[in-house]
Image (tube, rainbow, N blue to C red):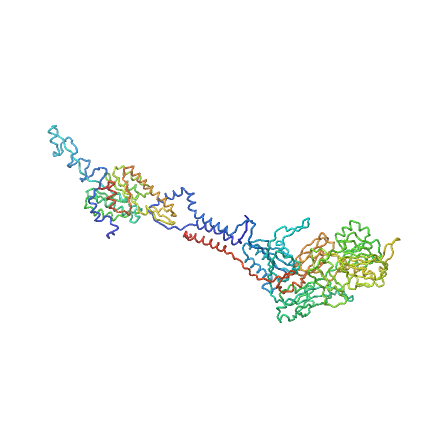
Amino acid sequence: MTPPNDDQIVLSAEMMAKLERMELISRKIFRGRMKGERRSKRKGQSVEFSDFRNYVPGDDLRFIDWNLFARLDRLYLKIFLEEEDLHFYTLIDDSLSMDYGSPSKFLTSKRLAAALSYIGLCRGDRVSVSTFSRSGQPLVIRGRSSTHRLLGTLQSAQCETNSPTMEESVRRFCLKNTGKGIVVLITDLMNKSGYESALKMLVAREMDIYVLHVLSPEELQPTLTGDLKLLDCEDSDIREVSISSTLLKRYQQALDGFIESAKSFCNRRSIAYVSVRSDSDIEPLLNDYLRSRGLVR
Amino acid sequence: MNWINMLGPWQWLLLASIPPAILSLYFLKLKRRECAVPSTMLWRKAIEDLHVNSIWQKLRQNLLLYLQLLFVALLMLACIRPGWSGMNRAGERRIYIVDHSASMQATDETPSRLELAKAHATKLIQDAASDDVAMVIASSDRASVEQGFTNNKSLLLNGVDRIEPTAHTTDIREALRVAAGLANPGRASFEDSVDVQVADAIPATVYILSDGAVGQLDDTELGQLKIEYVPIGQPQTQNVAILGFALQRPQNTSESSDKIEAFARIVLHESNPANSSPADSTPIETTASLYWNDELLDAQKIKLEPGREIGLQFEVDRVDSGSLKLQIDHPDPLPLDNVAFAAIRPNRQVNVLLITNGNTALERALQTSRIAQMAQVTVETKSFLDSQDYANAAADSKYDLIVFDRCAPKKMPEANTLFFGSVPPPDIQPTPIQPTPQSTTTPTAVPSSDNSNNISNSISNDTTNSNSDTNVNTVTNTTDANTDSNTDSAWVFGEPTGPVIIVDVNRSHPISQYLEMASVGIVESRTVKPPAGGTVLMIADIGPVCAVAPRGAYQDAVLGFDLVRPTEEGTEINSDWGIKRSFPVFIYSAVEQLAGGITEASAPTVQPGWPIHLTLSNRFANYEIKNPSGNLTNIERGSDGRFLFTQTEEIGVYEVYAQGIAEPVERFCVNLFSSRESNLQVGLELKTGAESISATDTTIRARQETWRWWLFIALGLLTLEWIVFNRRAFV
């Protein structure tokens, strides 16, 4: 396997050093499967007192509150908050429309997924990375030692010709993953069948949903001219246009409306919507924008 | 706004093709560049939004097209030069008179003088300023306006193109009158006899493109006309021409009646004496060939000196009817005048009416077998003169000859007349004679002692002293110095006196040539003096007592005495001529010559384009005339009872046919016979009275307008700009 070019590296060592100081945070507290560094609502073994309960035979005698027995002459057990791990899911849209732009949206998406997943790995979170094509077979890793697997998977990921739709991919994801956590959906939302049903499924899962809407500069400000036959990358739809200032203006309006519509949809459903340009730097995006949105700290 | 079409058909076609070309460029299927996009979702939405405002969008998208079409429409409008009637005009007026007479058919210029004149006229029109108005007149012996005043050069050029060569003579005065009609408007006379100019004079420049043989212009008032004379033709051009060709039967009675004498007058016109070279003064030897019905009869070698005429005589026998053609076998620039035609008029039976209350000698003289062969004689009494039948017959030319014996009608009939002892009605007097432009003559080079008097063969021609609007050429003998005709313009009848002794008889006139009157006794007679153009047949001691004179198409013979005369007791013999042998001879000759039983051997001839009056038998209401090309034309009797034929454009022999008769009943010829047309010297100046107009250069400096070409280039650039701007490839 040939080493990737510098402009194809999803996560540089320098970046990794910066990301080790970050932590993924969730607006919701979710129950993890394994002991992690996050307080969980589950009662477990930690130093933080949570509550008392009646002693039943078989409980650990170390957690009997003897002071309370002395006063009430009854046996009560101290309950402490459990420290659990966070489930961090990353779903990357690998449809052909993502392989557009300079740099391509897919590369940016992989970089974002790598950065956020690495943060989770550093904190012992359970990280699940998959693309739409492999939403039923995600890469689930934990711990910093799984970094190479993370990077290897992301580096080798390619846009797929027959990538399933967003709705299908999210459905598969929801069926596969019953737990809760943070799910970051990195996509361009250029799905002709719509994104609403997919996001609704995620909302139904009561996950902390982040939608990173990745668009290329060519999409945001197209520089097309002349009489063109536009070819849709995904379904080979053809549109003949004669580029004019009026048409570009109409396109801009349509794009702004699309973005606004997505943002509005997400906001109404407590989905964090983040607009990302594919040519923007990851570090300021993570440090500033995602931090302000509450995904990292 | 008046529509002035400035463009020709192909120019209209070119202009009309520009908008469709632009439209087709705009709407042709385009080859589009393929461009991959992540999704057409947003583009589709953008296009749909665009289509929502499709009406305005279409307009906005096509605004460029509309602007360009509007621009093209403005350019096209500029090309057709719309205008409106206005009072102000800055250009000058021009009149182009192109001579298309016979002399302009000369081939000393290639291809002919007329074509060169038309080329010059075309150039003058093209070089004229765009706001100049002009008209084109074709001139020969009459003027024809080919194109009225216009500033449309296409129309003017078409007018020039329409001018065809003719064999007519030239009289440019009518063309100048037409031109002067504009430049010199008419004046109105009012009751106080003050002439007032009714319109402003508009000066005009007249360009005369001719070889100079335009006739006399002495009496032409040019007024506001400025004449520019453009001579056409080579200055040194010799030409052989036949100036006269006539037939007659020999005067000598010993000759057989079927012998014909043909006389011709031939001239070699020299080139301009001032410019002539020694070679031009060399005599020309050539051959004159005589054809009978296209069969060669005779030929003579002739030698022509430059500037001199010669006479030719041929004797042809055993011919009684048909046509003769004389041809000069010498190639020269004008072959029109190298051929001449003459025809022998066919015999025909005539109708004779005798009105008498009884004249045995006269009646018997008209009942001879010789007369019966050529005439049908009807005898009526004097009371017949008052009948409607006579009036109808006189008006309808029913009779070829009416003999009035001691009587006279109230009005001269439409027939030849012979008056015995009576004074004709006043309307026998002829109308004033108009001067003729040309007269062809019988040859004068033939020596004959009896040829000193007139030999007229104008029995059927309209002479110059009647119906001046027809102006038919007259064939007369120019040697009238020895004529015995009265030079007065009217008949003069004396009072009866006597006794009378005939002292002289005109032996040269066919009516009287055989008469012996020495022993004829006449008790009483009146003198009869014919008008100018008439011929005295008998002279008595008291003066002329018998004469014949033309009256339009007819001839009137008046005998100053009768055979019998009325007295108180009844009638008595006035003359014993009736029992003399010369009397029936006289009657026969009179019927032959006056009624046209056997007319002059030579058929009448006219110049090309001139009409001819035909005196034909009144038995047929219409006749057919076959021209030399063989085309038939039907003619009907006119209101005056005569037949007028005007289609004499072609030189040759014309034959007149009556229905049901295979042989022609009459013939006449059309010959050029014009010394002025045959003389191909190019006049270097025109003389109008005291003024002399010199030849001018045809080069006229004028501003050439080129804006049309720039306009067409602009249209082409606009079309090219459309192609380049859109950078479209055609699919």
Q: Is residue B521 left or right of residue A145?
A: right
Residue B21: percent from left, percent from top: 46, 51
From the viewer's side, name the closer residue of A195 and A262: A262
- The extreme top residue here reads A72
Residue B663: percent from left, percent from top: 71, 59
Quarter residue A188 falls in: top left
Q: Is residue B206 left or right of residue B447?
A: left
Tell me: residue A109, above or below residue B142.
above
Residue A151: percent from left, percent from top: 23, 47
From the viewer's side, name the closer residue of B32 and B75: B75
Q: Is residue B460 visible?
A: yes
How many numbered discs, if any? 0
Residue A207: percent from left, percent from top: 25, 38
Q: Is residue B183 left or right of residue B531?
A: left
Q: Is residue B537 left or right of residue B134?
A: right
Q: Is residue B665 visible?
A: no
Quarter residue A257 falls in: top left
Tell me: residue A29, above or below residue B514.
above
Residue at image coords 77%, 61%: B485
